[in-house]
Image: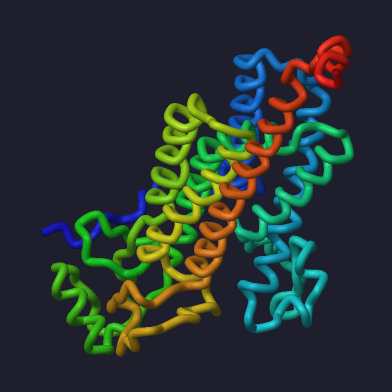
Amino acid sequence: MLASIPFPSWIKPEIIPGLPIRWYGFMYLVAFLVTYLMFQRQCKQRGLEVKRDQVLDMFFWAIIGLLVGARAAAVTIYDPTGYYFRHPLQIILPFAMVDGRLRLTGISGMSYHGGLVGVVIAVVTYLKVKRLDVLDWADMLVTGIPLGYTFGRLGNFINGELYGRVTRVAWGMIFPDAEKFNVKLPWVREFAGSIGMGVPAAGLANLPRHPSQLYEAFFEGLVLWLVLWFILRPRRPFKGFMAACYIMGYGIIRFVIEYAREPDIGIGWPIMLVPLENPVIQFSPFNFSTGQILCFLMIVAGLVCLFVFRARARREGARAAVEAAPKPSSRRLRQKVK
């Protein structure tokens, strides 16, 4: 039995060794470019006369909203220690004092859910200021987002971050920077033995984990995009339908994948309906992470949007039908009066 798959040694975070240019950042640029091209393609297919500057401006503000929202949520929701409240400059500065020396630390910590809120606020505000159709543009935007999102999760995998929980599955992977466990703990030796993994007599053991970044890249990215682009987009019944389906679809898929994903450090399991002696290797579908709570709220929000947008479309359709109905001539009105 194959105990685990080692993280490929040839994968490095830096594109060029020694330079602060990382695949993670590059993948995000690719994600934005792919989403932009998908948006432009839809405009062309529908024959819409959309100014290129307006699209670029919308994407500019969307990126700003994403960065601000994602960072704000990461340093509040995902920092129960209060570190960033005590060191507010670390929210935006890529360096910090470590052991009395100034070191380059980078800006780590971004929240998808916070980024989503930031994008919604920025994009809706821009479209309303420019008096553009918010729901129609939103539908085109979200239809391409999952394909771009695929590259973002691949960037997480290359970075060896956001890995999954400890697992016995044959494709479990050893991530170099994952939390290690003392081999003197009985459960560590028992677990390693159950998968045929050798451990040293003393020290720390790095146990295999779900490659949850790849799960997310495939299901939240590629699969969701295929459903939105090829199945739902040609059958869009009303404006806002695609936006509502994206919010629900992402929320549902991410909720399920969260069962395999390691909860972010410092958060743990905020809702534990079933107490577990060792949550590292034990599992219950009735224990929920912070990410799952946020995804549940996404699902509810998507359902609400679906009903609200459908009701709005029906009202507009009824109003248009009344306005298009033939009006009686003055002669017919006189005849009715007689």
Residue 196: name its quadrant: bottom left
Residue 118 falls left or right of residue 336: left
Can the viewer see residue 152 in this picture? yes
Residue 48 falls left or right of residue 209: right
Q: What residue is drawn where x is 38% and y is 84%?
A: 273
Q: What residue is drawn where x is 81% and y is 32%?
A: 132
- Front residue of 137/171: it is 137
- Front residue of 279/38: it is 38
Residue 326: name its quadrant: top right
Residue 255 falls left or right of residue 67: left
Question: Where in the figure is residue 267, as x and y percent of width and height?
Answer: 53, 78
- Residue reaching furthest to the top: 331
Task: Give above or below for 18 relative to 297.
Answer: above
- Front residue of 216/305: it is 305
Can the viewer see residue 14 in this picture? no
Question: Where in the figure is residue 184, as x and y percent of width and height?
Answer: 27, 89
Residue 278 falls left or right of residue 297: left
**Figure quadrant of the C terminus:** top right
Count of picture labels = 0
Task: Give above or below for 113 relative to 336.
Answer: below
- Front residue of 143/201: it is 143
Task: Give above or below for 233 relative to 126.
Answer: above
Question: Where in the figure is residue 250, as x and y percent of width and height?
Answer: 49, 50
Q: What residue is drawn where x is 23% and y is 83%?
A: 201
Question: Where in the figure is residue 259, as x and y percent of width and height?
Answer: 37, 66
